[in-house]
Amino acid sequence: MEKTKKSTKRLATAKELNRVVTEFYLECHQAKAEGKPVGWMPPMNGAIELFYAMDLQPVFPENWSPVCAAFGLTPANFEVAEGMGYSQDLCGYLRNIVGFVHGMMGGDQVPLGGLPEPDLLVYASGGCIPAMKIFQIMEHRFPNAKVFRGDLPQVALEHIQPHHVEYAVHQMKQLIEFLTETTGRKLDYDRLADVVRLSDESCALWDEICTYRRHVPTPISAAEIGIMFVLVTRQGTQIAVDFLTKVRDELKERAENGVGIIEDERLRLFWDNIPLWYNMGLFNYFEKMGAVVVAETYSAAWSIRMDTSDPLKALAMKTLKSYPLVSCVSVETRKEMVLKACREYKIDGALLHSNKSCVPITLGQADIKRALEEELDIPSVVIDADHMDDRNFSPAQFQTRVDAFMEMLLEKKGLL
Ligand code: SF4
């Protein structure tokens, strides 16, 4: 088994992914060349919709990291970051982007042209610490960029109160003021309402796409999950809505005709934690025993439905909710989320990715493992790895554990 491998994609829409990704980065570079202000920001916050509504270009350094992993650039980026003193224990997203901006960025050989330099850096407190630290480091690396540091409470999903939302709305207003002053562009509130409506439409489509994964056999597997790229980068655009509509239509047709993503579905698996971005082919590995990963913790978190009647409040809520949805949530809530998904997607077994450089999402897996067994009689296996760093992944150990696990599941179902 190889340490790094691309997934095999079978959906026609998933095969379009290269084009979708390339077009986004081309657009980012074109924006820079045309003098449109480029702003770097974390994913999943209300600033994305504000940027699209104000005709500014958002860029997501955290999400550039999976792209680097897919292109095999991470070892070089890690070497630079670790040479600067960043520990191997730190989040792989952080180490990769730090290494990238201090190393190969701007070079001729960087796939997709790399990232255009930021004119603006927009981030907020609250959420995962490495995600914030990335931007503090970027402030030093790009001293000419104008910086907006939002102030948001670190509040768990289930503890968000009206005063938190009110405070976040105030922060959104300050961000609008900052963007107006620094770029000279005014926000058209009718345009913002359209963008928020499109953003919500994308989330509704994503929810619908996820419901097709409940079908037996499933018409889509985790190997195709890169399609969520548009949810990360294009929230609030017609491009995202059109692409997800195509995905939805393809899945609907497959589901209605009983066409599974693999020929003979025998086991349905759940993946907890972030995928191994350098080895998405791992999701095809299970197919040799008729197993398919039908749901993950990570992908469900990219849909945040919004109350479109109040766009600013909707964006404030989205910003408050985004990180807590996966990483800053109590162990109890995370456990309930996994149990719910395992029930809804008719899961036979769970793969718990113990992610060395992402502690927040790994925390609580022992409790989740116990609850799956005791409450749902669903066995699980722990996969020791890392979402970005293949040095923390042993294919041999993976194969031994997973093969034995799948045999046990088949036997449990009376299929062996
Ligand atoms: S949640 Fe995990 S992967 Fe995301 S920024 Fe935090 S440590 Fe990194």
Image: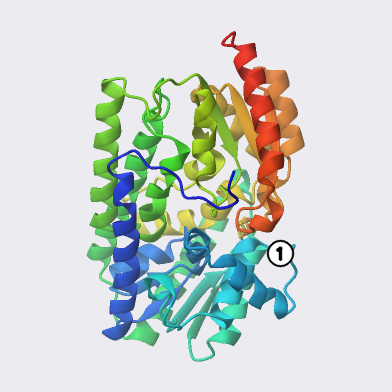
| Residue 345 visible to an observer of this rendering | yes
Q: Amino acid at mark 1?
A: Leu
Mark 1 surroundings within 10 Å by alpha-carbon count, few (fewer than 14), some (14 through 19), many (20 or more): some
Query: In the picture provided, is 67 more to the left or to the right than 381?
Result: left
Give how far across and how far down residue 386 sits, in percent.
66, 52
Frontmost residue, 73 versus 120: 73
Give how far across and how far down residue 318 sits, in percent.
46, 54
Frontmost residue, 59 versus 257: 257
Above or below, comparing residue 303 to residue 59 in the picture: above
- Write down the quadrant of residue 244 in the picture: top left
Ligand 1 found in image quarter = bottom right
- Write down the quadrant of residue 224 in the picture: top left
Give how far across and how far down residue 2 sits, in percent.
58, 48
Query: In the picture provided, is 22 more to the left or to the right than 296?
Result: left
| Residue 132 visible to an observer of this rendering | no
Query: In the picture provided, is 228 more to the left or to the right than 371?
Result: left
The extreme top residue here reads: 414
Give how far across and how far down residue 398 sits, in percent.
67, 39
User: The N terminus appears in which quarter of the rendering?
Assistant: top right
Q: Which residue is mark 1?
A: 90
Query: In the picture provided, is 270 more to the left or to the right than 7?
Result: right
User: The C terminus appears in which quarter of the rendering?
Assistant: top right
Label 1 sits on a secondary structure element that is loop
The residue depicted at 36 percent of the width and 63 percent of the height is 49
The residue depicted at 31 percent of the width and 67 percent of the height is 52
Cβ of mark 1 under 8 A from ligand 1: no
Frontmost residue, 261 versus 244: 261
The residue depicted at 57 percent of the width and 81 percent of the height is 103
Above or below, comparing residue 231 to residue 370 in the picture: below
Above or below, comparing residue 86 to residue 393 in the picture: below
